[in-house]
Amino acid sequence: MVQHGQTVGYVRVSSADQNLARQLESIGEVDRVFQDKVSGGARIARQGLSDCLAYIRNDDLLRVASMERLARSLIDLQQQWTRSSPRMPACTS
């Protein structure tokens, strides 16, 4: 098994009245979790995601319940990865 630093989680729901519990259960045990309650398509900053990307290190593992919680599209995901390089960790969903 590959050694890594911390296991970091990121969860997002589209509105404040939605519950994060299912996603938290899906990502399992993590060392630290970041969250947002904002639409993925919203043009406002997702502070939880920004904080998560600033926090993680190259040897960390990022867990998300599903990739669409992390990015709106494959292009958006690629841009996030590029902006965060070289610190972007392995990512699982």
Image (cartoon, rainbow, N blue to C red):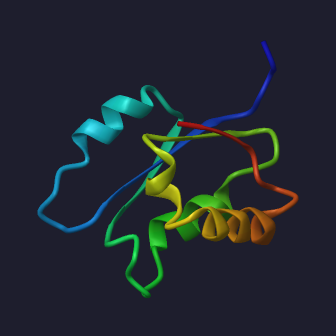
- Taking the image as shown, residue 91 lies to the left or right of residue 21, namely right
Name the residue at the left extreme. 17
Residue 36, located in which quarter of the rendered image?
A: bottom left
Tell me the residue at 69%/52% (across/down).
56
Tell me the residue at 25%/48% (across/down).
20
Q: In this rendering, is residue 70 above or below 30? A: below
Name the residue at the top extreme. 1
Q: In this rendering, is residue 87 above or below 44? A: above
**Residue 18: x percent and y percent?**
16, 57
**Residue 59: x percent and y percent?**
80, 39
Name the residue at the right extreme. 86
Name the residue at the bottom extreme. 43
Tell me the residue at 18%/50% (across/down).
19
- Taking the image as shown, residue 22 lies to the left or right of residue 30, namely left
Residue 79, located in which quarter of the rendered image?
A: bottom right
**Number of dots carrying numbers:** 0
Q: Which of the image's four quarters has the N terminus?
A: top right
**Residue 27: x percent and y percent?**
44, 33
Residue 13, located in which quarter of the rendered image?
A: bottom left
Q: Nearer the viewer, residue 73 or 35?
A: 73
Tell me the residue at 66%/35% (across/down).
6
